[in-house]
Image (spheres, helix red, strand yellow):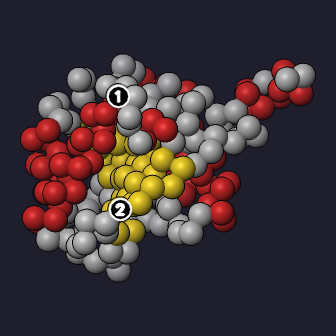
């Protein structure tokens, strides 16, 4: 596997990075500036771009979604939401729902899937972070190695309660009129004739 990029401004990212690096070689940590000025050339030939524990604004997340789409590099978002941890979406542009598709549908989900990581979120113990990092690594490897049973490749979000180990999945649907990833966004005239 080639390198996967990971980004977060939070102190906990050190433990996440160390834990994920045990399973994913060549993981690279990006700086805030690199993410804020992310350009297509940076992403060339990457198997995936991972955003973990982000505090990115919706606008920046949307921009990264667009840059990954242009570079045709899969994007994976993993975030703590309250006391839960969410893996996904894993975006294969043109096949699964992208971040913009999910945003359009979030009114239909029983939770806000893109609440930014904040100081109000419960702090997880190092042990729990190590367990979750192992789980995230397994999902990332299945995703990038195109394992047919990969939940992320099927467009699902995986929501985990780290304290009980309970988890559930919700499937997002690629929007036919997504402003980023649909044929409508690229070729409106062609889309009319489909
Ligand atoms: Zn989309």
Q: Position of residue 12 (x, y in %)?
A: 19, 63
Q: Identify the residue shown where x is 45% and y is 35%.
A: 153
Q: Position of residue 92 (x, y in %)?
A: 50, 32
Which of the labelled discs sits on residue 28, or is there none?
none
Whether residue 85 is visible here, answered yes or no, is no
Q: Identify the residue shown where x is 78% and y is 31%.
A: 184
Q: Say whether marks 1 and 2 touch (CB < 8 Å).
A: no
Cα separation between marks 1 and 2: 20 Å
Q: Mark 2 Cα within 10 Å, few/some/many (few <14, many 20+)? A: few
Disc 2 element: strand
Which of the labelled discs sits on residue 147, or is there none?
1
Disc 1 element: loop
In this rendering, the answer to whether 89 lies above or below 146 is: below
Q: Identify the residue shown where x is 30% and y is 42%.
A: 139
> In the picture provided, is 190 more to the left or to the right than 3?
right
Q: Name the residue tied to disc 2.
A: 167
> In the picture provided, is 58 more to the left or to the right than 33?
right
> In the picture provided, is 70 more to the left or to the right than 148?
right
In this rendering, the answer to whether 16 lies above or below 38 is: below
- N-terminal-most mark, 1 or 2: 1
């Amino acid at each position: 596997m080639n390198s996967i990029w990971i980004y977060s401004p939070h102190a906990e990212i050190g433990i996440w990075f160390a834990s994920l690096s045990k399973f994913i070689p060549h993981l690279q940590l990006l700086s805030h500036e690199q993410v804020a000025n992310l350009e297509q050339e940076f992403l060339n030939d990457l198997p995936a771009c991972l955003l973990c524990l982000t505090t990115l604004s919706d606008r920046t997340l949307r921009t990264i979604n667009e840059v990954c789409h242009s570079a045709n590099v899969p994007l994976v978002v993993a975030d703590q939401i309250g006391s839960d941890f969410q893996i996904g979406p894993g975006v294969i542009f043109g096949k699964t729902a992208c971040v913009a598709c999910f945003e359009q549908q979030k009114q239909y989900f029983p939770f806000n899937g893109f609440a930014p990581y904040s100081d109000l979120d419960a702090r997880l113990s190092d042990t729990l972070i190590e367990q979750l990092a192992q789980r995230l690594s397994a999902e990332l490897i299945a995703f990038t190695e195109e394992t047919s049973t990969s939940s992320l490749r099927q467009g699902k979000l995986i929501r985990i309660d780290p304290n009980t180990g309970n988890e559930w999945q919700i499937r997002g649907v690629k929007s036919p009129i997504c402003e980023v990833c649909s044929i409508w966004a690229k070729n409106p005239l062609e889309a009319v004739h489909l």
